[in-house]
């Protein structure tokens, strides 16, 4: 009798184990499908962005209207940034994408510089038009390669998860990893671009910073998922899953967050491998209705930063579009605005929800600074500003220099000819270090 009882117990245990194993199998399959879908979404967005950039580059070369050129260049700048983010989300950490990534960064920075120039009323030079032609030619090649890869993926049903794992026998036999092959080909042969000399916001010296070693312990991917969930809010997150790693200035774990509220879409969060700091939050959420004022949005964004441990942050610039506001915050020390310590927050103007966060500049630049007393007084610096500018506000600011250093300046904001300008006077030498112009576009204001 006891033998039958033991046999029965073992049989029940076996059935339970089988059910548990099957459920685990189903859960793993669902996770794999969801992860594949996220990678697929990033790839298709990359293809779409590059295609849009190609079209807009061709348009700007035939545009004879300054306002139209300004809109197109501004759009290329934004879409290049978005393409870089999509590229970084692909599971391609086993190959080098430095050339492709640099191409997108250069394209974004150059178009930002040309946007500044066009917004200032100046026309593009022959050399700049030729640079755009070369960039367009490279973009056509890049788009063609991506379109061929897209066709191959559709025909052979490639698994992005298997590419990430890089250990699937079936993948090697069936596809020979065409994704890796195609991106390797892109890196080796197809991307060529001119040497761009310009005074844009991200010069070559600033782009080539060394990796930053943040303080704190090294964390694993599971801890990164916990940190990302806490940052967004446990009550908002439905599920967390691993995402592609980041290997930029700050090595980071990637985390995908599926939110309870579908209008926010999925979040991609980068958490530093050392120190466990949230570097970037990107959301694919759709347009929102506008219910909050910009003043209310700035206050909610400031409160969010305060809650996350970023104190003494003041809003310095904002852009508003599609029911969203992107607000730049800079650190303030002893009444001086520290522009290198920059954090960007993207917030919904419908309900004040956070859609995006970017603290890379802050983490790279932030440090304890000893600010010396300036040689010039505010009154002396004001006399060095053109009398044509009607000054509305003034303050001390620390701005990044072209060579990677920092310059203490007096910041004067004022009006001339119906436009708004910001003039920076070196607080020690009296040199006019920079002039920015604020202009309005259909997507909001730009500082140029």
Image (cartoon, rainbow, N blue to C red):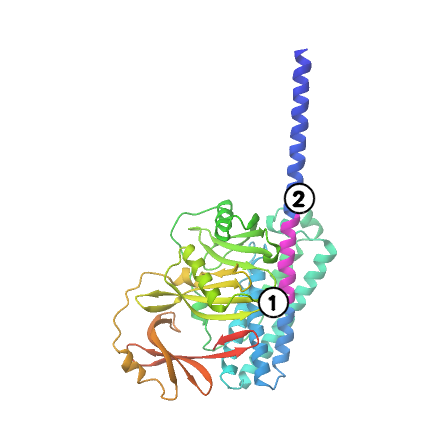
Q: Secondary structure at mark 1?
A: helix
Vertical order, 241 against 15 (above or below)? below
Which region is colored magenta? 33-49
Decide: is 54 above or below 278: below
> How many circles with numbers are drawn on the protein?
2
Examine the image and state in which quarter residue 322 appears. bottom right
According to the picture, the residue beneath numbered tag 1 turns out to be 189
- In front here: 385 or 279? 385
Residue 42 within the magenta-colored segment of the rendering: yes
Q: Earlier in the sequence, mark 2 or mark 1?
A: 2
Q: Residues within 10 Å of mark 2 (few under 14, many from 20)?
A: few
Q: For residue 127, which quarter of the picture?
A: bottom right
User: Horizontal and vertical percent for residue 133?
Assistant: 60, 79
* Label 2 vs label 1, nearer the camera: 2
Can residue 132 be seen in this snapshot? yes
- Name of the residue lying farthest toward the right: 155
Q: Position of residue 424 (x, y in %)?
A: 37, 78
* Residue 172 point in image, percent of width and height: 67, 50
Magenta segment's dominant SS is: helix
Q: Nearer the viewer, residue 307 or 101?
A: 307
Q: Residue at x 65, y 72 (%)?
A: 140
Instruction: Give left or right: position of 107 versus 359.
Output: right
Which label number is shown at residue 29?
A: 2
Dot 1 crowding, Cα within 10 Å, few <14, some 14–19, many 20+:
few
């Amino acid at each position: 009798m006891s033998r039958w009882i033991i046999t029965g117990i073992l049989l029940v245990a076996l059935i339970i184990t089988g059910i548990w194993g099957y459920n685990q199998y189903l859960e793993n399959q669902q996770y794999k499908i969801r992860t594949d879908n996220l990678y697929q979404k990033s790839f298709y967005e990359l293809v779409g962005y590059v295609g849009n950039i190609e079209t807009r580059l061709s348009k700007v070369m035939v545009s004879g209207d300054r306002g139209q050129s300004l809109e197109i260049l501004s759009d290329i700048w934004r879409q290049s940034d978005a393409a870089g983010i999509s590229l970084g989300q692909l599971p391609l950490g086993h190959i080098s994408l430095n050339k492709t990534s640099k191409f997108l960064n250069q394209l974004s920075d150059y178009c930002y510089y040309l946007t500044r120039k066009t917004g200032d009323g100046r026309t593009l030079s022959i050399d700049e038009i030729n640079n755009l032609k070369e960039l367009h030619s490279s973009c056509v090649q890049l788009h063609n390669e991506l379109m061929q890869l897209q066709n191959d993926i559709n025909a052979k049903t490639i698994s992005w998860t298997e590419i990430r794992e890089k250990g699937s026998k079936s993948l090697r036999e069936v596809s020979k990893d065409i994704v890796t092959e195609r991106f390797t080909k892109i890196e080796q042969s197809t991307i060529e671009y001119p040497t761009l000399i310009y005074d844009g916001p991200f010069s070559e010296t600033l782009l080539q910073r060394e990796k930053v070693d943040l303080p704190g312990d090294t964390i694993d991917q599971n801890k990164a998922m916990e940190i990302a969930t806490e940052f967004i809010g446990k009550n908002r997150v439905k599920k967390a899953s691993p995402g592609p790693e980041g290997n930029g200035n700050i090595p980071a774990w990637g985390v995908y967050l599926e939110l309870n509220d579908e209008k926010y879409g999925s979040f991609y969060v980068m958490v530093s491998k050392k120190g466990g700091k949230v570097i970037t939050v990107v959301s694919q959420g759709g347009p929102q209705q506008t219910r909050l004022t910009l003043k209310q949005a700035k206050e909610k964004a400031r409160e969010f930063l305060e809650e996350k441990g970023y104190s003494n942050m003041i809003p310095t610039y904002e852009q508003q579009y599609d029911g969203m506001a992107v607000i730049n915050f800079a650190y303030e020390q002893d009444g001086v605005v520290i522009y290198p310590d920059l954090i960007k927050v993207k917030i919904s103007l419908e309900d004040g929800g956070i859609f995006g966060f970017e603290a890379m500049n802050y983490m790279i630049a932030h440090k304890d600074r000893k600010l010396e007393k300036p040689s010039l007084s505010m009154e002396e610096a004001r006399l060095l500003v053109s009398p044509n500018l009607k000054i509305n506000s003034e303050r001390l600011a620390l701005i990044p220099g072209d060579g990677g250093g920092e310059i203490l300046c007096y910041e004067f904001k004022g009006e001339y000819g119906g436009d708004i300008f910001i003039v920076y006077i070196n607080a020690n030498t009296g040199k006019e270090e920079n002039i920015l112009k604020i202009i309005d576009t259909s997507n909001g204001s730009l500082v140029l």
